[in-house]
Image (spheres, rainbow, N blue to C red):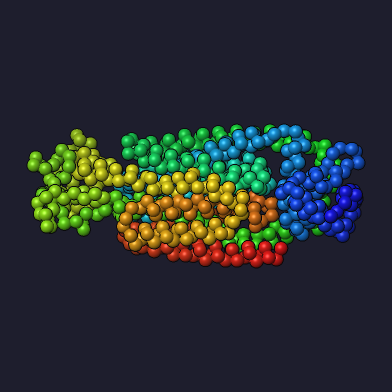
Amino acid sequence: MASIRETEDCVASSEDKTASIRETETCVAISEDTILASRGTRRRSSMRASVANYNATGIRRSSSIYYTARPDLMKYIEKENPILAMELNESKREEEEEDTGTDFRALKLCLLVLTSIGQFGSIYTYMMTEPLMVKLSEVFVKDINFHVNYVLMFSLRDAPGIFFSLPFGILVDNFGPAPCLVVGRIIQLIGQIILTYGIQSASWPITYTGTFVLGTGISTSNIANPAFISKWFNSNELGFALSINSVLGKVGGVIGVFLSVRIANKKNVVNAYWVSVIVVVVSLMAASIASTLDIFLSKKKIAKQAEFTSNLIIGGSKSAELSDAEIDSIRMILSGFNRMFWLLGIITAVSLNIPFALSGITQGTLLERNFFKSPTQLQCGLLHQGNCTAGYLVPKEGNPALDEGVDEGRNCLAVGYAPLLPSSLTINGDNSAGWEKEEYMFSELTSKDVNCADTFWSDACTKNYCEEKYAATESTSIYLSMNLIGSVIFQVPFGIILDKFGCWTSMLGIVPILYFVAYFLLTFTSGSPLPIYILQSVGYAMGDAVVWPAVLFVVDASSLGLAYGIIGFFYCLGGCIFPLFIAVILKQSGGVFLPSAGFFFIGVSIFLFSIAVVLGILVRASRQRI
């Protein structure tokens, strides 16, 4: 083990700008030896107990602060021994907090709460469109391709991440995550206002524009948010902190699903979107407060530590010509994004988007499968085939659905099936009643002709159909929010497991297995959807708890912002591509969700499992080399 004297000599010689690379290698070896010795007495223990303090002016200075204040030396250490670099950075952060004499735990908790409020708004707006498919179809009632255009909204929502994740990740590295987080929230607010106006005016171009701008704000905020939290939390508590942030944010998604459906059904869908604008305003305020607090705390820490670091950084103005250390740093960053990192990006794109791709069509899928099934397979018929079924236009004797099979003549009631519609209609419009048309003439009436936003259908002619349809849409809300509810329940425990045991590759391998079982049940069974969505939500919570902290395990800390930008790019790429596949499937199937969509999800889960296996093999091989 390196002696105190050896470490002092190492630090003293390193202050010389002309120190040779051999001397630097010796310092690295001495420090590594010291850290390895300190690990035996205390995991991630401070370097203060085993590394000598040295300062010619008599001011206390630990070697970890010294090395991290020397960018050229630190870059060399990061290249030659990433584990040593991680220990030095970790020790530096611990020493900084102790040397300032300030307990930052309460302030860190405050920052975590503020960023979580911002995530609340992001996920609220991200999720609120999914349970409003039926109500939006009434707004765009004249659109014969509504289902395709509706699904394309989700692609446009995630498309900005493909274009802006990488440059925004670089901006986070250069300007810091706090101001970038505020900018993201501002863009999100602008997009939500445009989207709401587009819904109000029933204009797809304006709706698409607002969705794209909203997606830009959400994707940029999602890059700055984990980088912001990573700035204030140590690596051994980061998984827990990110899980708390994600869970509190996803509570917003759960509330958004239920509240949006309730407002849309009780009032109208436009009011539901204006409420979301208010939610985003609150998120922006929280981000602004967090940014202000971040600036204050950063200045305070810098002022306290100036006496420790002012004489350590190699002085003088920076040369316009890149030094060898800077060139090595660039090479290190590029080479640091190895195959494990890119595979992690693919896993992020798939594992975190497949559940939401299903959520986008969950309402239609569950209405078709469980809650509002087509009555054509029932042996039922109306007493008067060409008359209204419920409302003030129903014949005096009523128009019940009667069994035409074994129990002919009995009322035909079946739970989970849509009420029967008239086979044809010929009714003149009544403008005094607020009907939208002057006449309603259908030689062959189908469910696509019934617009429950029109009082003719909802009050006069098919009141029972519209009421049961709205009740069925509310029944699907719980399943739309299952991914978020699962995250709220399971993500923090998964984050703790990750911090304690580090079995992240095994956890990533379990995720696609859970998905496969869930999608198999969805496609080939007709029972309760609850087990399906429980399995999917557990898989999603596990994946979300692992992929973001796992970035720290496969890249260098100095390029964390760029790394999160690339991961954000993959995340948005998956969110953009999967709805396009769904749109093609719906186009080919004539708007029928199953079984075609189910086969797609099963195939994707198999693909995800194969990627997770390859990643596990590479990680295991890299550990053996170390």
Residue 486, horizontal then vertical, whole percent = 46, 47
Q: Is residue 109 above or below residue 528?
A: above
Q: Is residue 581 visible?
A: no
Q: Residue at x 50, y 39 (%)?
A: 121
- Residue nearest the observer in this picture, 289 or 307: 307
Q: Is residue 570 visible?
A: yes
- Residue nearest the observer in this picture, 619 or 325: 619
Q: Residue at x 21, y 41 (%)?
A: 463
Residue 33, horizontal then vertical, whole percent = 81, 55
The image quadrant that residue 519 belongs to is bottom left
- Numbered marks: total: 0
Q: Is residue 43 above or below residue 248?
A: below
The image quadrant that residue 444 belongs to is bottom left
Q: Is residue 35 left or right of residue 444?
A: right
Q: Residue at x 47, y 65 (%)?
A: 606
Q: Is residue 121 left or right of residue 554?
A: left
Q: In which quadrant will I find the C terminus? A: bottom right
Q: In which quadrant will I find the N terminus? A: bottom right
Q: Residue at x 58, y 63 (%)?
A: 615
- Residue nearest the observer in this picture, 528 or 417: 528
Q: Is residue 556 left or right of residue 445?
A: right
Residue 57, horizontal then vertical, whole percent = 90, 38
Residue 60, horizontal then vertical, whole percent = 84, 39
